[in-house]
Amino acid sequence: MVLMSVDGMAFNKDPILVTKDLTKRFGGLVAINRVSITVERNSITLLMGPNGAGKTTFINVCTGVLKPDEGRVIFDNVDVTGWPPHKVYSLGFVRSFQIPQPFKSLTVLDNVVVAMKGYGEDPLSALIRRSWVKNEEENIEKAFRILKLVGLDKYWDLEAYRLGAGQLKMLEVARALASGAKLVALDEPIGGTDPRYSTYIFEQLSSIRKQVDVTFLIIEHRIDVALKYADKVYVMDRGRVIAEGKPEEVVKNPKVIEVYLG
Ligand SMILES: Nc1ncnc2c1ncn2[C@@H]1O[C@H](COP(=O)(O)OP(=O)(O)O)[C@@H](O)[C@H]1O
Ligand SMILES: [Mg+2]
């Protein structure tokens, strides 16, 4: 079976994200220190490490929120080093913020429709009623497909504020997919400590990536639930990558054990 993106594009085998010696300093502090990682397409890749390890800074530098001091960021075969955030976003690298920010008074469906690229961007086409209606129908159809993918289709008519925390996270993912995301970075999506919540999120993400060509880069500092679902894990500590590999290898790595238990 050939995996397709949400827009029906064929699958490409190159890594979706490569960083090379990425470095960011804040004054004398080296927040990330020559970080080189490879995120394979359609994977669930985990970035772990204790507080202050540099995980959020790494994502911020990759997505253009911060400018790197050294190193390169290659996204989808394009060198995006130092690009402004909106340009990285429009290539399909979408960063979901730690706090879900859908429009709470809009329905679940409308939240997805307004996240679509081009929505409301062309006031002229809105004047031509027939093309407007056709677009609207296509957008709604696509939004339903995405909602089904993230498991929220049965809640399409609910205002977003009625959703639970895990469902809001999935609405955020749905909005990222609607915007054309190829890589979705989730910064600590689990947040709370209820294992049912994290299992729900990871089950959903696993199911989504089996159906469409999307990649998840997930930042987590907890090592338990997430490992079961990850293809590859990078562990950071004090700005550096200290371990990488399959989850079952990484948890046995003495450096990782020291950082987590020492
Ligand atoms: N804007 C900033 N200015 C100065 N120091 C920062 C800034 N952002 C992060 N840091 C520092 O960089 C280090 C890495 O932080 P961060 O990337 O947030 O780590 P993590 O997400 O792994 O907890 C920490 O020591 C933090 O205090
Ligand atoms: Mg962080």
Image: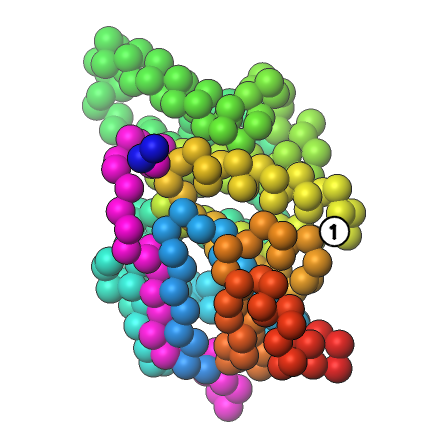
Residue 125, quarter of picture? top left
Which x, y percent locates residue 112?
47, 29
8 shown above or below 232: above
* Residue at the far bottom in the pictured view: 28
Residue 247 in the image, given as x and y percentages of width and height:
58, 62
**Looking at the figure, which quarter contains the C terminus?**
bottom right
- Is 17 inside the magenta-drawn segment? yes
Q: Residue at 38% across / 56% down in the picture?
A: 40
In this picture, is 63 found above or below 252?
above
Residue visible at 50% across and 77% down in the picture: 241
Query: Residue 197 at x, y = what percent?
Result: 72, 42
Q: Which residues are magenta?
A: 3-32
Depth order, front residue of 174/149: 149
| Colour pattern of the rendering | rainbow
Which sits in the foreground, 5 or 56? 5
Q: Is residue 105 visible?
A: no
Sort mark 1 into few (<14), some (14-19) or many (20+) by Cα contacts within 10 Å: few
Q: In the picture provided, is 35 more to the left or to the right than 205? A: left
**Residue 128 found in image quarter:** top left
**Mark 1, residue position:** 192
Picture residue at 49% right of the left edge, 85% below the top: 30
